[in-house]
Amino acid sequence: MALYENRIVVKIGTSTLMNGLGKSDLENTEKIVRILSDISNLGFRIIIVSSGAIALGSGRMKLAGKPPSRLALRQKQAAAAVGQCALLFMYDHFFGFYGKTIAQILLSAEDIGQENKKDNLTKTFDTLLEEDIIPVVNANDSVNVEEIMTSDEKFGDNDMLSAAVAVLCRASKLILLSDIDAVYENHPGIGTPEPVDIVTEIMDNTAYIASRVDGKGMHEIGTKIEAARYASLAGTDTYIMNGRTPEKLYDIIKGIPAGTRFAGKKQ
């Protein structure tokens, strides 16, 4: 089926929402919301897939300064429940200031995989978008424990969740906001890696690396590549870009190169 050219899924990573002290980065979050609200006013329909619930909830629960990766599973579940309230309140506050209404949708792999649930979800998204309401999507971490146990689970990472939402909603663009500027080709021992503007054929995951904004070196980006591959097969263009420079979202809607674009397959 044809894609909706005006539908854009934006995945906002935890590193984009939090500062170096593990607290909410309100300035950057407000900037992203303002730009997305402005893009919505240009006629685009925005869907947000947001991480950050566990990190926000951990802070609210004062879990001894432990990073989310070191929390027990039951602590992560509880933190997700607390953090969802904080996350939605933050989005509702900022989007409301710019005259936008949001809606919360919590998903699991089962919701996407079962045809009747998938059909109901599609109708819900369509109705919300037709009314210019911005859905804010997250994994239902408090209930579906396997989704936060390991990043190897298909929907245990919000990169893959955002790709599934983009395909479900037939969005023309999927934008992954993270702590990296772009994807680099992985040629070990051969000079300085060069950023890639566009990828037309996605190769093996190990063919790509990314440079951290903070200069701490290269790190693995397998889930982002897998998300791009999944969305590409449905024809959706996927962009990987730095969440600290959200003004480049304007470049993307104007067709100006930003970050790395993984071109969707022509249907």
Image (cartoon, helix red, strand yellow):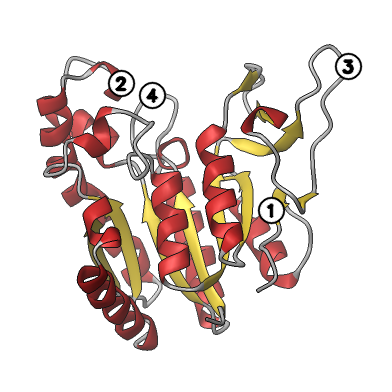
Task: Give the mark nearest the N terminus, 3 or 2.
Answer: 2
Dot 3 amino acid type: Ile
Label 3 close to label 4 by CB (< 8 Å): no
**Residue under pointer 1:** 262
| Residue indicated by mark 3 | 190
Q: Are marks 1 and 2 in contact (CB under 8 Å)?
A: no
Mark 3 vs mark 2, CA separation in Å: 33 Å
* Residue 40, numbered label: none
Q: Which residue is mark 2?
A: 69
SS label for mark 1: strand
Residue 42 locus on image (x, y percent): 58, 82
Q: Which residue is mark 4?
A: 21
Q: Secondary structure at mark 3?
A: loop
Q: CA distance from mark 4 to mark 2?
A: 16 Å
Pick the front one: 45 or 100: 45
Q: Position of residue 185 (x, y in %)?
A: 78, 32
**First in sequence: mark 3 vs mark 4:** 4
Q: Amino acid at mark 2?
A: Ser
| Number of other residues with Cα within 10 Å of mark 1, as a class: few under 14, some 14 to 19, many 20 or more | many
- Point out the frontmost of discs 1 and 2: 1
